[in-house]
Amino acid sequence: MNLLAQIITWINGLTNTLGKFLLTPPIAGLSGWLSNTIISALLGPLLLIFFKYISNQSAIQRARDDMKAHMLALKLFKDSFSVTLRAPWGLFQGALRLLFHSIRPLLIMLVPVSLLLAQMGLWYQYRPLKPGEYTVVTMNLNGNSDSPWPAVTMKSTPAVELTTGPVRIFSQRQVCWEIKARQNSAEPLIFQVGDQEVEKELAIGDGFMRVSTDRPGGQWWDIFWHPAEKPFSDDSAVQSISIVYPERLSWTSGTDYWVLYFFVASLISALIFKPFLKVKI
Amino acid sequence: MHKDNGKLDRREFLKQSALTAVAFGAGLNATRVYASTKRRLSAGAANKVIVIGIDGMDPGLSERMMGQGLLPNFNRLRQAGGYTKLGTSIPPQSPVAWSNFINGAGPGTHGIFDFIHRDPQKQCAPFFSIAETVPGQGYWEMGDHKIQLDFWPFGHKLPQTLLRRQGTPFWDYLDQAGIWSHFYDLPADYPPSASKYGHHRCLSGLGTPDMLGGYGTYQHFAEDGPIRTRDEGGGRRSVIFFENHTSKPPLKLIGPTNNFLIRPEPTTIEFLVHRDLQARSAVIEIQGQKILLRQGQWSRWIKLDFDLSKPALDKHVSGICRFYLQEVAPNFRLYVSPINTDPSNPATKITEPPTFIKDISKELGLFYTTGFQEDHKALSNKVFSDAEYAAQAGMVLQERLNLLQYAMKHYDDGLLFFYFSSTDLQAHMFWWDSNEKHPTRSAAQAKHYFNHIKKLYQKLDAVVGDILNRYGDKATVFVMSDHGFANFKRQFNLNTWLRQNGYIQPAQATSVLADVDWSRTRAYGLGINGLYLNLKGRERDGIVAPGSQREELLQTLVSQLEAVRDTNGQRVIRKVHRADKVYSGQATALAPDLIVGYCRGYRASWDTCLGGMTDEILLDNDSAWSADHCADVSEVPGVLFSNKPIAARAPALVDMAPSILTEFGLNIPDSMVGKSVFKT
Ligand SMILES: [Zn+2]
């Protein structure tokens, strides 16, 4: 595992703790649209304040003043050829400066926002399985096509019934199982891979639960977007394990749409709070 | 579906529809006028009528089994006077028979005479009789695509599917009177006829196509399959190659045809199959879904998304199918069911109102939506073994039993109609009630599978028992079939017979659709029971003059055909009916001139139905489709059970609609020829 992956894993440890502590009460306790609205409403002004402190507010102010002056010049000296020629150029330069001063803070903000989205995604992107539903579990093994195949078994648990498998996909070094959820559970699935025992989180239940589709391998990108579970180390026989979960159908707190709703709601909330917070953007 | 059968039929069809609409309006004024849609029933009228349609339930077998105490619930009805044979239609084919049921009158009123009709103007081009797809008209080209704007000032016409059944279905009278009717799997009603007053719900049954547009096309992939995909009537076979146990090249599933293209082409979905020999299992990867199957296992219904490319936004249509892993090694075989319309997101209208199917799907999930659900083609084409077919048909029945539970749960009052296809499509393959040699099975196997049919009757007896327990004292209950069943041991090639007797020329002709000399051909067979004269003024190349020449020819054909004997001296044809004697009504334009009614044990040969000729006139039937009912009307009556004593002496299908209307206190419209079975 490279350094970046290591760092993200470490950060994930922190965000998981924070995420569980801060997000569980609203999301698990309220309906989807309400929890997403509350989180967005709080986050809008919070991000504004954050922006205020990490951006160069006086430089932004100067750029804005400059632009205002050029606008005024355009209005006042409509008939002056040289002004009409110069003012738009000045406006354009001002806009560029404004952009330049916003990009850095925006990039900085991208990191915590993405970490938050990764945590929120655990709740909203998919729903847990319901008892009676079937799904497929896929284990990716490390090694190449010539490497020997370890013996792989899934341990039986009262929460699920193993309906088909393991079935191996040789060309992709995958092992697959079909399972049927039997009862509500947050207990992990346990696999024996050679002499190694590995776990994969599993969520069966109603309403909102943290649903981790993937326990990732050593790729920093995967680790970033699948923060809930500890990534497999490079020397593990297992590269990753994934479980297919049903999509959550909702315009405010369901698969994919929750992100859209989150951005729109937090933007509206930020615009409402902007005059009170005296932030220049 | 037939795509190209002339404007004349369509005009005719529209004209007929308009006529019946007028007649309908006039009839209502004359009989019963309702100020509002609120129901007014005469004293003693029922407000619940339940009709269970059991396609092909045979009186002979039913009576035998009742006598042996094997059908206690049916027997209870019989002992209370609620049992009789039910006269079927001429000919006794399901689309014809159920249309008689629907109109309360014969084929002359609904215009369905056979599974297959022909276009006389195209010199006997055949097409399916129940529905017609009218191609669109006019478009703009945009690259490979066509753009059709069906509004002013462009006025392009979009392709559409029309129900060809004519006349007024009896539920229109219920609808008008504010009486609810619920139909589940109603045959001969695709696309479902629209309800004027909104008191009618219908899920189309027999006649509803799959997403490829036929009556059901499976797709089969096997290591010993043909290199080039082969069509085999109801199915397609392809080869599968493996590299490192993964299919290579990827397999292609054929989907619905993209009619937005100037040259319409079927859509395809690529998918992969990975096999694990040791686990005797496979993983199918299709559209991001993984499906795990053990050898012999069926998948659940899988949703597939077909992308119909368009110049602007593509249109996506949803279909459903099931995979069945038949064998992993040594010959990997994978069966894919016909792709059915997705009931949760239907691409075509298969219910009235269109939302009805979504409501059902919300509770029941996904289920077969094609008319023919039992995949008999897979058995006929030897893709399925007998046991595999029985298992698949069993799954169909289970789905339908779930649907029946839904139907009863959502039924308050009015009419409830529920249809079972199992008794027909399983009997076609498994019925064999004699000691003669079965076309494909040993004596023991034939007996074993005939017992399977008996068990099916017992299962339905229990279903009827359950309905009687729930509604016996609240509703008028009918259990009926459209026809009975008979062995299909010998096949008669009508066209070969016509050729050998000089009616079809030249003597070496092989098919009515290919190499017949119409200037010398006087008659031809098409469909299962139809015989047509090559009539001047009607057929494009007609030569038989109407009047005495026609009359003479008809008489000769009838007497000669009724005299046909098999090699063992057995009679082949019970009766040949003249259309001008047995049909009356406004919709006789496409009727055959003669309807050949076979004796039990005989049927039209496989080849002759689509005009083909063979060396011999009479051949053994060698198909797994070893029982049939397309015989003479007198040979295969159906059954009628009721929880009320039946008074009519010899009731027939056309009496069902009048009986139902009478039960609700409505008058019998003039368009119907039948009368209530509870009256003598
Ligand atoms: Zn049939």
Image (cartoon, helix red, strand yellow):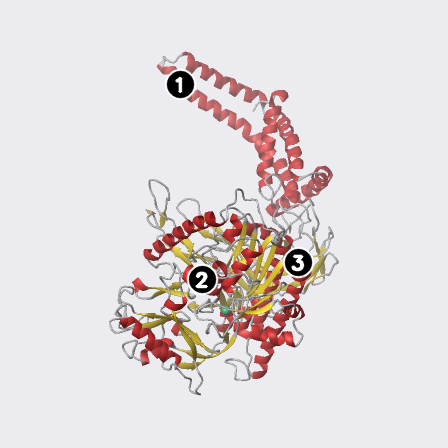
Label 2 sits on a secondary structure element that is loop
* Point 46% across, 49% down: residue: B30
Q: Which kind of residue does numbered mark 1 sit on?
A: Arg
Label 1 sits on a secondary structure element that is helix
User: Do pointers 1 and 3 mark residues of a single chain?
Assistant: no
Side of B521 where A22 appears, left or right: right
Q: Residues within 10 Å of mark 2 (few under 14, many from 20)?
A: some
Query: In this view of the protein, which residue sits in the foreground, B285 or B268?
Result: B268
Side of A27 where B680 appears, left or right: left
Q: Residue A57 sits in which quadrant?
A: top right
Mark 2 vs mark 1, CA separation in Å: 72 Å
The residue singled out by tag 2 in the image is: B214
Q: Which kind of residue does numbered mark 2 sit on?
A: Gly
The residue singled out by tag 3 in the image is: B471
User: Do pointers 2 and 3 mark residues of a single chain?
Assistant: yes
Q: Chain of mark 1?
A: A
User: Do pointers 2 and 1 mark residues of a single chain?
Assistant: no
